[in-house]
Amino acid sequence: MACPLRVYRDNVFVEPGNVNEALTDAMVEVYFTIRHFYMREKKFDTFQADIQQIKIVKPGASITTSGFKPRNARDGPLEIIKTAGTIGKDKEERRSNKRARTDGDK
């Protein structure tokens, strides 16, 4: 069963959808447990750590949001029309065509 990460800001629970934004650049106290297991048959040590809760001591700087709505990742991959390199080549080609027309008018 999935259990939400216990993140608190000013002793108020931070909803799972807001956790990434709340933790970005924040100073936090992390409370966790570490369990040690020794496997006698294999003479092997193993450890398991579990985060119990996170308290935000000092929030990070607020991030200004743009007017654009982020695309839902579950909608599928983005269709890339042109790569950055292609766009740069198109701009350079337009510049050189413009220069050629300007030089031709003289």
Image: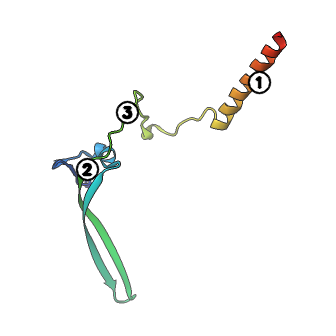
Q: Residue at x 36, y 34 (%)?
A: 64
Residue occupied by mark 2? 58
Q: Residue at x 29, y 78 (%)?
A: 36
Q: Residue furthest top?
A: 105
Task: Give the residue at mark 3.
Answer: 65
Q: Where residue 106 sits in the image (x, y, percent)?
A: 83, 10
Q: Earlier in the sequence, mark 3 or mark 1?
A: 3
- Sequence-wise, the earlier of marks 1 and 2 is 2
Q: Amino acid at mark 1?
A: Ser
Badges 3 and 1: C-beta atoms under 8 Å apart?
no
| Residue that carries the numbered disc 1 in the rendered image | 96
Distance (Cα) linking label 3 and label 1: 37 Å
Q: Is residue 77 left or right of residue 90?
A: left
Q: Residue at the spot x=37%, y=89% of the render?
A: 41
> CA gap, disc 1 to disc 2?
52 Å
Give the image location of residue 67, x and y in percent. Answer: 40, 27
Q: Whole-percent x and y of residue 32?
A: 25, 66
- Give the number of the mark in front: 2 or 3: 2
**Dividing the picture into quarters, in which one does residue 102 lie?**
top right
**Which tag, 2 or 3, sits closer to the chain's start?**
2
Q: Amino acid at mark 3?
A: Thr
Give the crowd class for mark 2: few <14, some 14-19, many >=20 residues within 10 Å. Answer: some
Q: Kindly state the secondary structure of the residue where label 2 is placed.
A: strand
**In the depicted view, which residue is nearer to us: 35 or 42?**
35
